[in-house]
Every structure is written in C-alpha cells, then in structure tokens.
Image (spheres, rainbow, N blue to C red):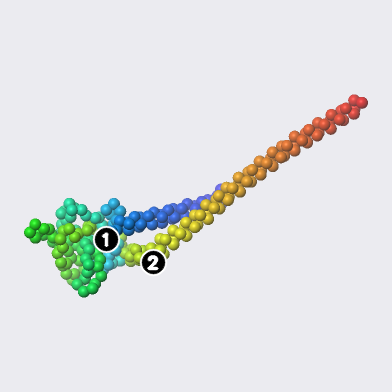
C-alpha cells in the first residue's frame, strides 16, 4: 500500500494540473468568444483583464502600474459611467495610442483628472501617473469602457505573449494535448490492469473449482477402492 502511495499522489497531481489547464483554456475561449470588435475587452460576467502597453502609469501612487503588470477591470454600463470621479482609473479605446501619425490602435488606461459637463454632455479627462505625463484629450463619457479594479504585478509580458497565437499554442494547446495523451495512456493502462486482474481472478476461481472437482473425484475413487477391499475381505 505504501509503495503505491507516491504513484497515487502523482496521479492526483497530474489530474489537478490537467483539469486546471482545461479550465484555463475554457476561460480563455469563452472570454475571446465574447469579443465582437477591436475595442471589446475579453471578459467573463463583466470582469476582464487588460495588458498594459506602456509605462504611462508608472507612478508613485498605490495603484500605479507598469507595462510589466496585468490589470483587472470591470466593464461599465451607462449608469455606472455617470458615477465616475476624479482619481478613478479607466480604460478607453483609441485608434492611435500616441500623437505620432500611423501609431497603432489600442486600449489606454489612465487616471481621471477631471469630470466636466459641456452643454448637456458629460466628458472626462485622463492623465498617466508617470512623471512628466501630459493630460490626454477629453473624451465623451460614453467612450469609457471599464474601470480599474486591481493588478497582478510582473505577469504582464507573459500574458501578452500568451494572448498571441504562438504563445497560446505553446503554453495552452500543446500542454493540453500532452496531458490529454497522458490521460489516455493512463486510462488505457488502468483498463488493461483491471481486465488482467479480472482475468487472474477468473483463472484463480477456475483453478479452485478444478481442485474441488479433483478432490471430489479422488474421494469417489477412494470410496470405490474401500468398497472393493471390503468386498474382497468378506469373501
């Protein structure tokens, strides 16, 4: 029993790892299936994450972050947008993430420095926490997609690579395929092991029955011999 314990522990650990990867794959798939446009954030039930592209928020505040971090956000509806205030960190989408012509489009996550009305419309102005960062152009309140809720330090680059086709294949698809093959092999071995055990039990049972039949036959022969000897003595 003690000899089999390490194998059982390894088997349980492999199963936990396998189903954890499967669960992660399902979460990634569901989150990405929800994306309909470039300015959609991958999310589950309104909670998502955003990769940080620059160090524009690399400041000294408690909730500042860098491009090495992964930030978590909550998607906003029309009502929650109206409750935005100075100090909130929000994400919005820009076709050009810098003033340089032809710069790539992407998400900008900056801190709200001003909320104001212009006529009957509400606007917000944001700014990065990095020293020397300039205020962004004001945006309409409807352009704000999400609000910052937390961060995971040091995993931003890994998550960015994981979101690429090569990274997703290398760290999700291939491990899942390998673990699936391992599970199939283990399952096949278990099936054969159970089958062999049943065959051995069947052979043992047949052996015991054969021995019992042999003992009965021997007893019958012994009784016949005794009867013959007794018959001869009576003569």
**Image quarter of residue 35:** bottom left
User: Can residue 205 be seen in this snapshot?
Assistant: yes
- Residue 25 is situated, as x and y percent measured from the top left of the image, at 38, 57
- Residue 132 is situated, as x and y percent measured from the top left of the image, at 18, 71
Pointer 2 local density, CA inside 10 Å: few below 14, some 14–19, many at least 20: few
Name the residue furthest front.
36
Name the residue furthest bottom.
101
Q: Secondary structure at mark 1?
A: loop
Q: Secondary structure at mark 2?
A: helix
Name the residue furthest left.
119
What residue lies at 16% left-to-right and 63% top-to-bottom? 139
Left or right of 204, for residue 58: left
- Residue 147 is situated, as x and y percent measured from the top left of the image, at 22, 57
Left or right of 76, for residue 18: right
The residue identified by callout 2 is 166
User: Can residue 149 be seen in this snapshot?
Assistant: no
What residue lies at 16% left-to-right and 58% top-to-bottom? 141
**Residue closest to the eye, 70 or 123:** 123
Give how far apart the Cα atoms at labels 2 and 1 are. 22 Å
What residue lies at 90% left-to-right and 25% top-to-bottom? 234
Q: Which sits earlier in the primary sequence, circle 2 or circle 1?
A: 1
The residue identified by callout 1 is 37
**Residue closest to the eye, 189 or 72:** 189
For discs 2 and 1, the disc positioned in front in the rendered view: 1
Q: How many marks?
A: 2
| Quadrant where the image shows the C terminus | top right
What residue lies at 33% left-to-right and 65% top-to-bottom? 160
Q: Which mark is residue 99?
A: none
């Amino acid at each position: 029993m003690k000899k089999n314990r390490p194998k059982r522990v390894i088997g349980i650990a492999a199963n936990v790892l396998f189903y954890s990867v499967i669960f992660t794959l399902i979460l990634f798939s569901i989150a990405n299936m929800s994306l309909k446009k470039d300015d959609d954030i991958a999310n589950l039930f309104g909670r998502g994450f955003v990769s940080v592209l620059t160090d524009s928020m690399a400041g000294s505040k408690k909730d500042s972050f860098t491009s090495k971090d992964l930030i978590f956000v909550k998607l906003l509806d029309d009502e929650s947008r109206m409750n935005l205030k100075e100090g909130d960190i929000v994400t919005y989408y820009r076709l050009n993430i810098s003033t340089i012509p032809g710069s790539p489009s992407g998400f900008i996550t900056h801190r709200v420095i001003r909320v104001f009305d212009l006529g009957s419309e509400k606007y917000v102005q944001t700014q990065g926490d990095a020293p020397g960062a300039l205020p962004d152009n004001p945006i309409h309140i409807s352009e704000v997609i999400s609000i910052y809720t937390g961060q995971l330090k040091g995993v931003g680059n890994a998550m960015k690579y994981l979101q690429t086709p090569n990274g997703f294949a290398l760290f999700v698809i291939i491990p899942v395929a390998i673990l699936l093959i391992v599970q199939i092999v283990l399952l096949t071995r278990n099936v054969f092991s159970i089958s062999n055990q049943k065959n051995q039990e069947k052979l043992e049972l047949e052996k015991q029955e054969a021995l019992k039949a042999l003992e009965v036959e021997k007893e019958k022969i012994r009784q016949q011999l005794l009867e013959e000897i007794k018959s001869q003595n009576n003569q």
